[in-house]
Image (cartoon, grey):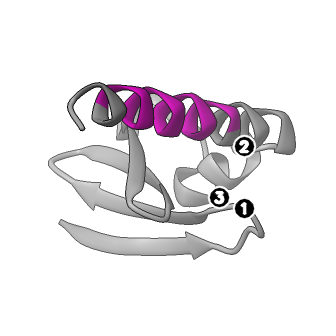
Amino acid sequence: MRVLAELPHKDCKITIFGMNQKYIIKFEQGTLEQSYKLAEADVVGGVNGIFEMLDEDFIQNVVALFADMRKAIITTYDKYQ
């Protein structure tokens, strides 16, 4: 897997990888991460096409999912303390 690009953002780290004719878009926020895989053939314009897809609406949905993920792990952790 190789790093193709990083996209700076104030709410999370965004890295685009290439592997086996797929793009892997990884979002990181603290100890949490989300990844999305897209076939290279499905993305028009290569990495630049991915940059166009990652608009602010999508990124805010990812950030909201991070909040849900954090809440879920805290709730689960608290049950076993």
Residue drawn at point x = 67 percent, y = 42 percent: 63
Compare residues 38 and 79 and report the one nearer the observer: 79
Measured as percent of width and height from the top left, residue 69 is found at: 47, 33
Whichever of labels 3 and 1 marks the residue nearer the N terminus, that label is 1
Name the residue that disc number 1 marks: 11
Tell me the distance, in whole angstroms, between the alpha carbons under discs 3 and 1. Answer: 21 Å
Measured as percent of width and height from the top left, residue 73 is found at: 37, 34
Q: Amino acid at mark 3?
A: Asn
Mark 1 residue element? loop
The magenta stretch spans which residues? 64-76
Q: Amino acid at mark 2?
A: Ile
Determine whether label 2 and label 3 are within 8 Å by CB. no
Residue 59 disc label: 2
Q: Nearer the viewer, mark 2 or mark 1?
A: 1
Task: Report if residue 1 lies within the magenta region.
Answer: no
Compare residues 10 and 41 and report the one nearer the observer: 10
Name the residue that disc number 3 marks: 48
Mark 2 residue element? helix
Residue drawn at point x = 77 percent, y = 39 percent: 60
Determine whether label 2 and label 1 are within 8 Å by CB. yes
Q: Nearer the viewer, mark 3 or mark 1?
A: 1
Q: Could you tell me which quadrant the C terminus lies in?
A: top left
81 w.r.t. 23: above or below? above
Q: How many marks?
A: 3
Left or right? Give the position of 80 relative to 25.
Answer: left
Q: Amino acid at mark 1?
A: Asp
